[in-house]
Amino acid sequence: MSKGGLILTSVLLAFFLCAFIALYVGYSLINPAGADKKEEIFIVKKGSGLRTVATELERRRLIKSKDLFMLWAILKGGTRDIKAGEYSLNRSMAPVRIFNILASGAVKTHPLTIPEGLTAEQIADILAKKNLVNKREFMSLVRDKTRVASYHIDGPSLEGYLYPDTYLISRDLDARELVDLMVRRFWKVFNDLIRGQKRDMSLREIVTLASIVEEETGLAEERPVIASVFLNRLKKRMRLESDPTVIYGLKNFDGNLKRKDLRTPNPYNTYTNYGLPPGPIANPGRESLMAVINPAETDYLYFVSRNDGSHCFSTTLKEHNRAVVRYQKRRRSLSDKPR
């Protein structure tokens, strides 16, 4: 065979070899490891390298070859693209699809519901029970004055600004990211509510009063009326006399509010202090914020529970005392008490 023929033969062999390798690699990358579609939770830890991830995928039999998986990642220029997080994979997925899922950060999300009216500490308890945060670390962030100021919030903590909602979160979120998520959601809702509204109160005053309204009633239709009661009392320089504010200021509250508690001074005792308490006593939802921003127009100065979740409203102390006798027969009326 001539020299030219040898060269041609070598080129053809090299071509076919390369083609075979390409076909083999391509087939391997689009051919799944199995047919089982059962969900496999796969967690990529922060700082994990490509080799670590590929090795674990092979060990879990989600891919057949870690080397081919790594080769594809290198060819795609995505050796650093794999995102940390929790993923939902299965053995019927092609390696190419698995790589795309990991590189795009399409993490598995879980619903997280934060009910309205919880304190920051109660929210921390929920998150800690779900193993999402360390409670002490979460509360440290909530009380970090530098962090509070970074959100353009005036106050000693983020109490009141951890917006209650249902969030879709990934399990790799840390305490800082969860705090950030809730505060940013608060600002989105609050800014939407005040758009076009005339405001006579500061952000802190609105959120503080909204937190009191949130704690006083569970009925959405009553919230603008209850807000009007407290606003009317503030205008007349009357004490708010709200039980939830007293409870918030008590240490180790046992669930039984006593008369001595109402007489014991503390910064949140609105029976002994005039005006609003120093800050929010809970994290209010949209309806309570809206109730303060756009309250009902009433002359009411008092309200008392009907013991069915609703309240009876009065304009005079005489009317209020009659309502107390009617609805709270076993309780003695406290003079000038708005409940």
Image (cartoon, grey):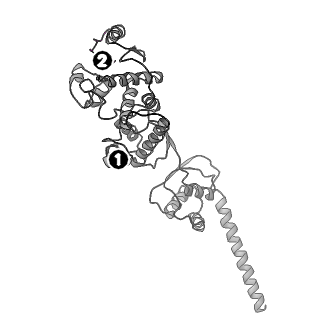
Task: Tell me if residue 17 comes above or below residue 72 in the rendering.
Answer: below
> What range of the chain is rendered magenta?
330-338
Q: Position of residue 322 (x, y in %)?
A: 34, 8
Mark sitting on residue 213: none
Give the residue pinned by disc 2.
Answer: 337
Measure the alpha-carbon separation of dots 2 and 1: 36 Å
Report the side of 152 relative to 262 (left or right): right
The residue lying toward the viewer, choosing from 241 and 79, is 241
Q: Give the numbered dot on residue 149.
A: 1
Location of residue 17 by image quarter = bottom right
Amino acid type for the residue under numbered disc 2: Lys
Q: Secondary structure at mark 1?
A: helix
Which residue is located at x 32 percent, y 26 percent?
A: 244
Give the residue displayed 40% in from the left and 28% down from the top.
Answer: 214
Count the numbered circles shown: 2
Let me know if residue 80 appears in the view.
yes
Residue at image location 60% in from the left, 60% down from the top:
64
Specify the quadrant of the image occupied by residue 4. bottom right
Dot 2: element = loop
Residue 275 horizontal/vertical position (percent): 29, 28
Quadrant holding the N terminus: bottom right
